[in-house]
Image (tube, rainbow, N blue to C red):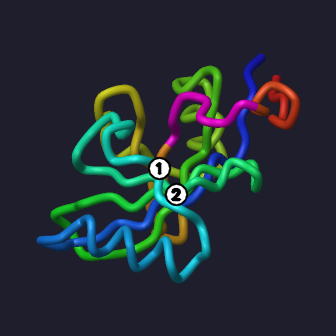
Amino acid sequence: MHRSRLAGFIIDCKTDDLERAAQFWSAALGYELRAKHEEASPLYRCLQSEQLGLHIEVQDVKHDSRVHLDIESDDIDAEAQRLEALGARRIEKVHTWIVMEAPTGQRFCIVRPQNKNFAATANEWK
């Protein structure tokens, strides 16, 4: 048995100025940026969207700009297997997460739990 749920949205930006991109999305969506010194990596800028129960971040990437979603799970491999059974395919493992592709071509990631309310709101799979 494992659990999973929508973690949030990642705004992938192919940019030379992540801070400017993050400031745009912060203003556009109406969520303050987390303090820069609190970021785990210089490749990410997180929006303070915890009240939504979603993790929203702006990410510096090398591929074309797009938006992708993250699914959080307490067992990343089990969730990948569940989604493969539904028709998704694994693209690659990166650090602690797995990049997947839906049968319709959209990329998404399976990540460790990101939200404080994960245990109370996640779907349970057998």
- Residue positioned most to the top: 1
Q: Is residue 80 magenta?
A: no
Contact, mark 1 vs mark 2 (Cβ under 8 Å): yes
Question: On the rendered structure, is 87 left or right of 98?
Answer: right
Q: Is residue 103 above or below residue 76?
A: below
Q: Residue sitting at 64 percent across and 46 percent down?
A: 7
Q: In the drawing, what numbered circle is on residue 45?
A: none
| Image location (x, y in percent) of residue 125 | 81, 29
Q: What segment is highlighted magenta in the picture?
A: 110-116
Q: Is residue 47 above or below residue 74?
A: below
Question: On the rendered structure, is 124 left or right of 90?
Answer: right
Mark 2: which amino acid?
Leu
Q: Residue sitting at 63 percent across and 30 percent down?
A: 73
| Image location (x, y in percent) of residue 70 | 55, 50
Image-quadrant location for residue 97: top left
Question: On the rendered structure, is 54 left or right of 39?
Answer: right
Q: CA distance from mark 1 to mark 2?
A: 6 Å
**Number of residues whose C-alpha sits closer than 10 Å to that of mark 1, classed few (under 14), some (14–19) or many (20 or more):** some
Q: Which residue is mark 2?
A: 47
SS class of the residue under badge 2? Answer: strand
Disc nearer the start of the sequence (1/2) = 1
Q: Which residue is mark 1?
A: 34
SS class of the residue under badge 1? Answer: loop
Quarter of the image for the N terminus: give it: top right
Quarter of the image for the C terminus: give it: top right
Closest to the observer, 12 or 22: 22
- Residue positioned most to the left: 16
Mark 1: which amino acid?
Arg
**Number of residues whose C-alpha sits closer than 10 Å to that of mark 2, classed few (under 14), some (14–19) or many (20 or more):** many
